[in-house]
Image (spheres, grey):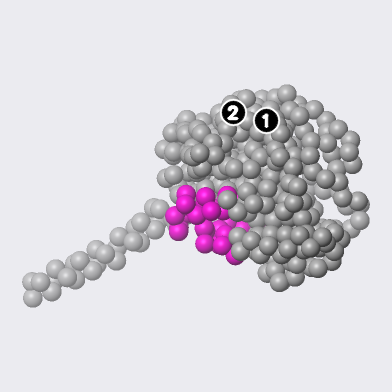
Amino acid sequence: MKKHAWLLVGLAAMAAVPAMLLAQRPEYPIVLVAPGKGPYTFPEGYQTPWDRIEIMVTVKMSPNLFVLHGSEALDPAHPDGSGGRAMALFGPDGVLMVDTENRQVAEKTLTAIRSFTSAPIKVLVNTHIHPDHTGANAFFAKQGALIFSQEDLQSEMLRPPPRANGQPAPAPEPASVPVAIYRYNPAAPGQPAVTFNMNGETVDFIPMMPSHTAGDTIVRFRNADVIYIEDFYRNFGYPFADQANGGSVRGMLEAIDLIGKLAGSGTTLVPGHGTLVKKNDLLPYRAMLVDILGKVKAMRDQGKSLTDVLAAKLTAPYDKTTLGDTQQSKDRFITEVYDEVKDFPPIVDGKRTMPKHP
Ligand SMILES: [Zn+2]
């Protein structure tokens, strides 16, 4: 009888505890605004209406680690959510930002940050050079951010590859250039180059092998169990290795394999675009890269031209399950693989001199 009463008390206590924990500690991540799924179409000559794009807190990763992202259906570069995701870790030690969103929405990005913290902006790390991730660098440097990146990203920014039309790209605004730089060490993939202990979190800047670009960095938040994996993985549109900026499709495979080692099964992975994922979600993407690399290489070894390879519609088995599946997205992907499997130019100063296709 006595034992039975004890059991009842025990059960009552067990029932009470989870409810109390739930009230105090919600389950992270908390998704407030999910990215769009499309399909999206934009009329010829459409220009992004930056004045209509909002920058919102879209996900809470912990009580003081938030994700910022833009509106859907307005920006043809990223219709599922304008810009590349940015993150802000905040608290008494100041704000640490991962990427900045586009230059045109710099004020809105700061306003979104000011909606949850008045702490000074202290640190900014760039995951790669693209303007949806670094466009507001100068603006946030003027707010007080010290900008970190791989040295290759700094080189890409200081001496940009020529534009697609062959014209030289304009020089960057000096304040936008990262000043705290580090390098990828091929002998120790996954080793952090920089670690911050601030605001109760431990943050690692981990330089990556040439993958989406030559200057990629992923950012690990150890306590929140979150890794910002930027753009070598995407689930909206086909893979993009920016080879002119040193990217590599084969490097994207290595990057995925490294995430397999760094992440636990429950680690939340934050791509720059598309939906949040776990490491097992990267496997079908990896298999697609391997399949397309093999098929394109076989065709190129048989002397097929790029036109022949594009006409073979090698992405067809994946089109139904790839959101943001546009002709431009799949042709860009196949062209990248075609250029990579033979005579792939080396990286010099963070860049490759890619062949021109008519
Ligand atoms: Zn991006």
The answer to whether one can see residue 113 in this image is: no
Q: Residue at x 52, y 62 (%)?
A: 280
Q: CA distance from mark 2 to mark 1?
A: 8 Å
Q: Is residue 242 left or right of residue 22?
A: right
Is 259 included in the stretch rendered in magenta? yes
Mark drawn on residue 154: 1
Out of 52 and 192, give the one closest to the viewer.
192
Q: Which residue is the extreme one toward the left?
A: 2
**Amino acid on which the number 2 mark rests in the picture:** Ile
SS category of the residue bearing label 1: helix
Asked if labels 1 and 2 touch by Cβ distance under 8 angstroms, the answer is yes
**Amino acid on which the number 1 mark rests in the picture:** Gln
Q: Is residue 106 above or below residue 74?
A: above
Whole-percent x, y for residue 113 in the image: 60, 39
The answer to whether one can see residue 208 in this image is: yes
Crowd tier of the residue under label 1, counting other residues whose Cα lies within 10 Å: few below 14, some 14–19, many 20 or above: many
Q: Is residue 7 above or below residue 326?
A: below
What residue did someone put label 2 on? 181
Mark drawn on residue 296: none
Is 254 included in the stretch rendered in magenta? no
Magenta segment boundaries in residue numbering: 255-284
Q: Residue at x 79, y 63 (%)?
A: 302
Q: Which residue is the extreme one toward the front?
A: 302
Q: Is residue 183 left or right of residue 55?
A: left
**Quadrant housing the N terminus:** bottom left
Q: Residue at x 73, y 37 (%)?
A: 351
